[in-house]
Image: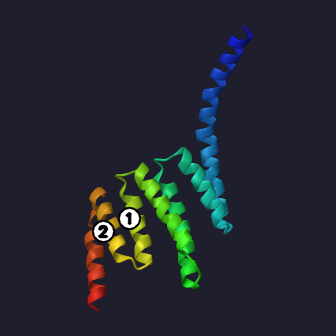
Amino acid sequence: MKRRILMILIGGFYPVFCISFFYLIIPYMWIKTDEAFHKGQYNKAIEYLSFISFFQPQNVECYVLKAWLQWSQAKYLYSQGLPYEEKLNQAVKTYKKGEKNNPQNWWIYYEEGMMWEAFGEKEKALKAYYISSKYSLTPYNKIYKIKKEKFKMKIEN
């Protein structure tokens, strides 16, 4: 009898826990991410975004923001002449994980292309832009063509 009551209580609380988790905790983590970002606590924001992406792997925005923070830090280190490869590799891993969980979402490929373009990796950027163009709608499906022309013009000058 006690075991049956315990099972009923657990069975009743589990759905309540799940609902509260996704409708209270995840939005709270977004708020904490925003607060950390505005305080300049970028590593903390990255941790919060990792938490969100773990529980919402189809949420492209958390991958895009996390990778952008990582590669922005890498770009800053690069501009200071400091080792930047670790942060850049973290950003690449974040994009790849996001692409694996959202293989046909154009936005994540576009953002990866922007990262590679910022580091002067035109071939990698064009590859990402090509995939982005393949999955996007007008006008974004012209990204690859526009970037290819842009890179070609820079090479000729």
Where is mark 1, residue-wise? Answer: 110
Quadrant containing the C terminus is bottom left
Picture quadrant of residue 128: bottom left
Q: Secondary structure at mark 1?
A: helix
Type of the residue with mark 1: Tyr
Picture quadrant of residue 39: bottom right
Numbered label attached to residue 81: none
Please name the colour scheme applied to the rendered image: rainbow
Residue depicted at x 36% and y 71% = 124
In contact (CB < 8 Å): disc 1 and disc 2? yes
User: Is residue 154 among the parts visible in the rendering?
Assistant: yes
Mark found first going from the N terminus, 1 or 2 = 1
Q: Mark 1 to mark 2: distance in Å?
A: 8 Å
Q: Badge 2: few (under 14), some or many (20 or more) residues near its Cα, within 10 Å? A: many
In the rendered image, residue 67, in percent from the top left (x then y), is placed at 51, 63
Q: Badge 1: few (under 14), some or many (20 or more) residues near its Cα, within 10 Å? A: many
